[in-house]
Image (cartoon, rainbow, N blue to C red):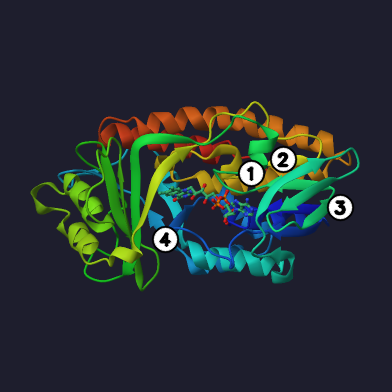
Amino acid sequence: MRTVIAGGGLVGLTTAASLRLIGHEVTVLEQAPDVRAAGAGIGLWPNALREFDRIGIGAAVRRMGREIDTWFFDAAGRPVRAPGSEASDHRFLLVPRPGLNNLLADAVGRDRVLLGSHVTGYTEKKSEAVVSFADGRELRTDLLIGADGVHSRVRAQLVPGSDAEVHAGHYAWRAMVPAGGERPEGTVLTVGRDRTRGGYARVSESQTMWMVNQFEAGPLTGGKRQRALRRARSLAEGGWHDDLLEMIAGTPEEAILENQIMFVPPLPRWASARVALIGDAAHGLSPHISAGGTLGIEDAGVLRAALAGEHDTAKALARYEAARTARFDAVREHAAAVEQASDAAEFAQRYAAFSHWMLTTAPDT
Ligand SMILES: Cc1cc2nc3c(=O)[nH]c(=O)nc-3n(C[C@H](O)[C@H](O)[C@H](O)COP(=O)(O)OP(=O)(O)OC[C@H]3O[C@@H](n4cnc5c(N)ncnc54)[C@H](O)[C@@H]3O)c2cc1C
């Protein structure tokens, strides 16, 4: 089976590696000139690591990352955990994103990743799909997977009118900095005043990642560092989080990533007979659950299992769509609850409810 994957990000590369396991001849089309990953570190949960074990990179990913035991804090620095939650509800692996995507590209095979290939659309026929590139090239395939992120071109054609929506006033700032004077156990996430959330965690022996999220961020004035710093002060009552403020103040402007948070609206369909969406292209969500990537990797396992167990591609894609839309109905409810938590205690309780649910109901693929 010839399978083309539009988008060589975390989920597109994972999907390619997963589908190679069941004998697909995969080609990944990535618009960027190299394999790259926007962002600093990504928290991966055991349900994602299981798919990495299947494709043979689990041990390398674990070596690359650091296990994080999450504590939440309030703005005054009091640690908070949901009563009755389990240790496993708080434990994930924090992995540097660029290293992870490079490892995945090696697993797929670099010659199967066509860089500088911007997909503009496709034509779906009874016997095949034809993928079009911005430079006029075309590629014929039996199956097309849209893993091209929140602004997916494949989704625009499969589900017209499904443009990503701006989550007004909601921004995230992140950067990787040299590890140093901060507490080695990190602060992972502080739920502060004025709907600000943020903290830091060690990604490796030498690198620490900080992040600041803000709802109702107001007008963005000044440089990125000033914008992040101004909001991070809501996390640092009584000086308890001055190390975070110093870390942000010492970060070069160009090292700071600023994201306007976008949502993909709930979709009436994820697939047709030969085309399917995966990862953020299908379900770009609030970053407050810190699991969009993990759930995208889970998508890849479910797609692999559906295609392995059914010769009729259209039926396999329908099975994949049914399984994933049902799971994401619940994910969306959890994500909204976590995002709207009013204080650190409520956040901790809703977060543990989400992670526990995600882990205990993860599909066995
Ligand atoms: C602030 C923040 C923090 C987060 N933290 C976590 C976390 O801790 N844990 C977690 O699991 N998730 C987290 N997430 C979510 C996670 O980052 C995403 O769910 C994940 O990166 C999605 O991967 P993807 O491959 O689907 O999309 P992307 O990473 O967006 O990749 C899409 C790829 O497609 C390419 N592309 C786009 N259009 C085209 C085209 N037309 N032709 C060819 N190529 C194209 C792009 O260049 C890109 O390489 C976070 C998100 C944010 C914003």
Q: Earlier in the sequence, mark 3 or mark 1?
A: 3
* Front tag of 3 and 1: 1
The residue drawn where x is 74% and y is 65% is 112
Q: Secondary structure at mark 3?
A: loop
Using the numbered discs, state the Cα–Cα distance from disc 3 to disc 1 in whole angstroms: 23 Å
- The answer to whether residue 97 is above or below residue 328 is below
Q: Residue furthest front?
A: 136
Using the numbered discs, state the Cα–Cα distance from disc 4 to disc 2 in whole angstroms: 28 Å
Q: Which residue is mark 3?
A: 1
The residue drawn where x is 64% and y is 66% is 105
Tell whether 162 sits left or right of 80.
right
Which quarter of the figure is the C terminus placed in? top right
The residue drawn where x is 69% and y is 70% is 110
Indicate the amino acid at tag 4: Ala
Q: Which residue is mark 1?
A: 153
Q: Earlier in the sequence, mark 2 or mark 1?
A: 1
The answer to whether residue 86 of the structure is visible from this angle is: no
Q: Which residue is mark 4?
A: 40
Q: Dot 4: within a 10 Å radius of its alpha carbon, few (fewer than 14), some, or many (20 or more) residues? A: many
Q: Secondary structure at mark 4?
A: loop
Q: Earlier in the sequence, mark 4 or mark 3?
A: 3
Residue 135, image quadrant: bottom right
Mark 1 and ligand 1: say if the CB distance to the nearest ligand atom is below 8 Å: yes
Q: Dot 2: within a 10 Å radius of its alpha carbon, few (fewer than 14), some, or many (20 or more) residues? A: many
Q: Secondary structure at mark 2?
A: strand
The answer to whether mark 4 and mark 2 are in CB contact below 8 A is no
